[in-house]
Amino acid sequence: MAILLATHDGERYLDEQLDTILGQEGVDVTVFASDDASTDATPALLAQRAATDDRLVLLPPTRQGSAHGNFRRLLIDVDPSPFDAVGLADQDDRWLPGRLARQLELLREGPAAVSSDVVMFDERGRRTTIVKSRPQVRFDYLLESAGPGSTFLLAPDAAALVHRVLRDDPRTADVGAHDWLIYAIVRGAGLRWHIDPQPTVEYRQHDANVLGANRGLAAALERGGRIVNGWLRAHATRVGEIVLALQPEPDPALADIVRIMRLGRREQWRLARRARWMRRNPREARIVAACMRLGLW
């Protein structure tokens, strides 16, 4: 299977992460690494590891400017067709033993993609399970991912679909998060996605995280700001447009939601009625609905 690793100034934790990926048992792994203009020793570390382990393949250095851009580059530039599955890897997590073998077995049961809950940990030794495996709802992919992209594993059909859409639709460059977009493409195409309640990744929480685990007051305030300033609505609209374009027969309910979102804050009360379709957590769906009714979304 192919594992797509995006790096940027990751020397502090990268060795440990690579050990947990390349040490996975019962699977054949090729890691494709794309470094995004690191200024620390990350490129040298990758080169050193690649020189002694042909399972690590280095893509030419690039400057993408974001994790989304770097993963998008990997998903476009790496041909998924020779592999039985494609996964994503952050540079600073730790993969639990048996992660890939378990997920590959889940894929063999029928879903097009799998992801999982994660265990968040920090430098103080605190550990918390982050639950992403609540029951999926019809259009949850418009407002959230299936969890951190580092837990994703795509079967060949899903990997080929994501590769094609990202390569052919330039709008995919403007979506805020690669994991959110991947989830939307797969779900929007009508393929099945399984979110495993058994954690497969230890997700490191530290100051350099791009988005972190979305927990705590600071994360809540940041999410609130993205609702009020229109960021979430704009990106959700773009995701919906991308999904509609890939559907042979566009879903009328999805088309209606996208049409209302394009209106900005006009008619948001109509959108509020559909909020329960757009978040897996009922409490979060109610908060989103309230923001829509108040004209804040």
Image (cartoon, rainbow, N blue to C red):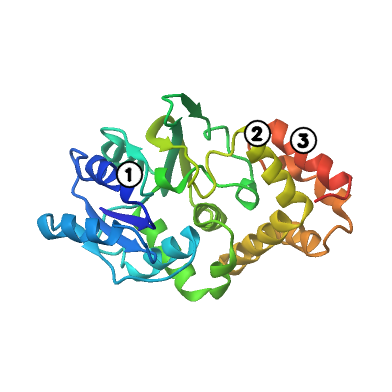
Q: Give the secondary structure at mark 3.
A: helix
Residue plotted at (33% across, 63% down) = 34
Residue plotted at (64% across, 52% down) = 142
Residue type at the position of mark 1: Tyr
- Asked if the residue at tag 2 contacts the one at tag 1, i.e. Cβ–Cβ closer than 8 Å, the answer is no
Q: Give the secondary structure at mark 1.
A: helix
Q: Residues within 10 Å of mark 3 (few under 14, many from 20)?
A: some
The image quadrant of residue 122 is top left
Position above or below: 178 against 96 = below
Residue 236 x/y as whole percent: 67, 57
Residue 203 x/y as whole percent: 42, 37
Q: Give the secondary structure at mark 2.
A: loop
Position above or below: 83 against 95 = below
Residue type at the position of mark 3: Arg
Residue 65 x/y as whole percent: 48, 66
Residue topped by disc 2 = 281
Question: In this view of the protein, which residue sits in the foreground, 228 or 170?
Answer: 228
84 on left or right of 279: left
The mark that comes first in sequence, 3 or 1, is 1
Residue 286 x/y as whole percent: 77, 35
Residue topped by disc 1 = 13
Which residue in the rendered view is the most extreme toward the left?
A: 52
Give the Cα distance between marks 3 and 2: 9 Å
- Asked if the residue at tag 1 contacts the one at tag 3, i.e. Cβ–Cβ closer than 8 Å, the answer is no
Residue topped by disc 3 = 286
The mark that comes first in sequence, 3 or 2, is 2
The mark that comes first in sequence, 1 or 2, is 1
Residue plotted at (77% across, 55% down) = 229
Residue type at the position of mark 2: Asn
Question: In this view of the protein, which residue sits in the foreground, 257 or 222?
Answer: 222
67 on left or right of 42: right
- Asked if the residue at tag 2 contacts the one at tag 3, i.e. Cβ–Cβ closer than 8 Å, the answer is no
